[in-house]
Image: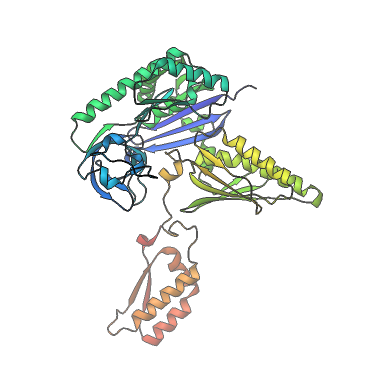
Amino acid sequence: MVSKRQKMFISTLPGEQVEVVIAEEGKVSEYYVEMVHMAKTKGNIYKGYIHNIDVGLQAAFINYGAERNGFLQIDEVHPEYYQGGYKLQKGQKYPPIQNVLRPGQEMLVQVVKEPTGKKGAFLSSYLSLPGRFFVYTIGRGQVGVSRKIEDEKERDRLKQIIEQIQPDEGVGLIVRTAGVGRTKQDLTRDYKYLSRLWAEIRKRGQSAKTPALIYQELELATRAVRDYLSTEMSEVWVDDKEVEDSIKEFMRLAFPRTSMILKLHTDPDKTLWERFNLHRQIEEIYSREVTLPSGGQLVFDGTEALTAVDINSGKISGERNFQKMVLKTNMEAAEEIAKQLKLRDIGGQVVIDFIEMKSPKDCREVEKTMRQAMKSDRARTVVSRISEFGLMELVRQRMGSSALAVTTEPCPCCGGTGVRRNMEWQSLQVIKDVFRQIRRPGHQNPLPMPLDEELALYMLNHKREKLMELERRFETRIDIIIDRKFSA
């Protein structure tokens, strides 16, 4: 089977924003955005100190220089930070955090999960450094191969190379998917680079004043090349000369044989997205609805706890072909959902409401299609079977740099619910407010009522008689005023 040829596109607004698209045969398969003012901290390593310890949560709150303290659970504390000796009791996996850590104690921590809402970042003192072919772990000495690499012969070959490299004591190595087919020389070079990097981090960590940033992850453009460039990638396009120079230098050091695929877009009359017909596909990522080839539709609705995906069947006529068309629509839906979860970087629990299938064989076929489609996802996923109610549950790891999270905000009209009170209800609330104010002794005359334009026009068109009735009854003029500050 001939593998699909991929292309990577990196569009930069200098000093403000970076966008990365990965396309397979012209179809967008991954999209990432990073804004400079919302720079990611995931993967960064800091020197911080314990601000306080919460016995109930068995966690420490770490001041590492951010706006909010980070959260460090006992299972993410490396034993080298334990203060004093403590023997585990029978049945204990970890010691009580209050017995082994002290407020004010300094430590190196890494951001595992970005701060969200009012929650601080999730931290770990088990550090890891991603390279081109390896993930270099400190404190966890295990060696292994990414689960995405399924070929047993290749897995064995890579494990043998790791044994020959002989990592330092306390250092673990996990081979990334980019390591497939790489020579011992390539892998050894990556290991030596990561070893040097860790030596620099450790040295910096010993001398820096707390709190301090010790190591910063690469910015999105270079990180995308490091993480996603593979033998299937035929071209990497950028639209900024400085970014081209930065990536060229990184490629020269990391994988010199592929530097020829880097290309610069210089046409001032066309954007990179327009040149390669990517703009419309990128816009579709923000749509609540996605149309399937058979005419069916996917509808995505997110809640705080989970994401619900509903599948609408479109036009299916005739009882004879009904189940056949249901299977076809569900199969299309499974493939498209896997693609959209990756594109939108939807993480956490996902519940999919498939169109009801009476045949258990059809259910198994859809499950198989979903699992196969999810294999290309770099995120860790767990896919369940379809329940008797036609529901499938899956859990997906969020990868970060989600375009939806970075570039959207709750609607000021509906507060993010997707619905709002209708004009009739809003107009009645205005009349209630008018009635309340107009009965007060010494009220203003005329009585001003500033409203947004839509509601003001509705009042004048549909509630004029009621307003006039109140004016006559209380001998007060009511002024409906359009106030632009109320407009969304």
**Rendered image quadrant of residue 121:** top left
Would you say residue 418 is visible in this rendering?
yes
- Quarter of the image for residue 449 reads bottom left
The answer to which of 404 and 202 lies nearer the viewer is 202
Residue 298 relative to residue 144: left or right = right
Left or right: 60 in relation to 305: left
Left or right position of 119 against 303? left
- Residue 271 appears at what percent x and percent y? 46, 31
Closer to the camera, 22 or 175?
A: 175
Q: Nearer the viewer, residue 398 or 7?
A: 398
The residue drawn where x is 46% and y is 41% is 398
The quarter of the picture where residue 171 lies is top left
In the rendering, at what x and y percent does residue 140 appear? Answer: 37, 30
Residue at screen point 69% across, 45% down: 363
Q: Residue furthest bottom?
A: 473
Quadrant location of the N terminus in the rendered image: top right
Residue at 45% from the left image edge and 72% from the top image edge: 427
Indicate whether 294 appears above or below 470. above
Which residue is the extreme one toward the right?
Answer: 320
Colour mode of the rendering: rainbow
As displayed, is residue 407 above or below residue 262?
A: below
